[in-house]
Image: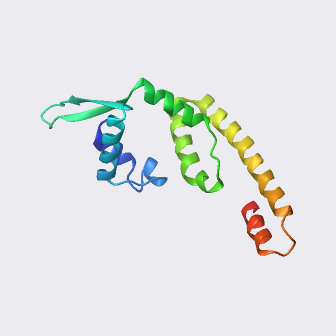
Amino acid sequence: MHGYEIARRFAADLDLGLVLPLDMSSVYALLKDLQEQGLIEGHRETVGLRPPRTVFHLTPDAEAVLRQWLEEPVGRLREVRSDLLLKLYFCRAIGDACTARLLDAQIVASSAYLDRLRRLASECPPGSFERLVRESKIG
């Protein structure tokens, strides 16, 4: 994919932009950083009479990093709305098995998180502000 196409996916009303809206300059800055880290490579391509553009692809190292990231469940509830949705977006491109593994791992992690919150709340004095805060995180 070329930079403009990637940036379009992060537009506020499309695909990734629904979760993480980024403007064009932010996307190009991230692409530069990823290139410097050796996680993506780019090659120039000319199509017809249009100006040349750089097409990017993941390096083998980046593919390994991405797969590892996709297998790790989100640790905190507030990250579900961003990180988990991003992971599901990329899992969808890989296939159903990736999505199933991620969701299974997320259920286990979320259950453990909920158990921990319940335990911490039960250790607080009844009626205390701390207990109220902990119980509010349980739902």
The single residue placed furthest to the top in the displayed view is 60
Give the x, y percent position of residue 127: 84, 75
Q: Closest to the observer: 26 or 85?
A: 26
Left or right side of 74 for 92: left
Task: Find residue 106 and report its image quarter.
Answer: top right
Q: What residue is shown at x 64% (from left), y 52% (from top)?
A: 76
Residue 48 x, y percent position in the rendering: 15, 31
**Colouring convention used in this rendered image of the protein:** rainbow
**Looking at the rendering, which quadrant does residue 53 occupy?**
top left
- The answer to whether residue 100 is above or below residue 28 is above
Q: Position of residue 71 (x, y in %)?
A: 61, 34
Asked where in the image residue 97 lies, by quadrant, the reply is top right
Residue 116 vs 135, above or below: the answer is above
User: Which of the pair 60/80 is nearer the observer?
Assistant: 60
Which residue is located at x 66 percent, y 33 percent? 101
From the viewer's side, name the closer residue of 71 and 16: 71
Q: Which residue is drawn at 33% across and 54% down?
A: 23
Going by the image, does 123 lie left or right of 5?
right
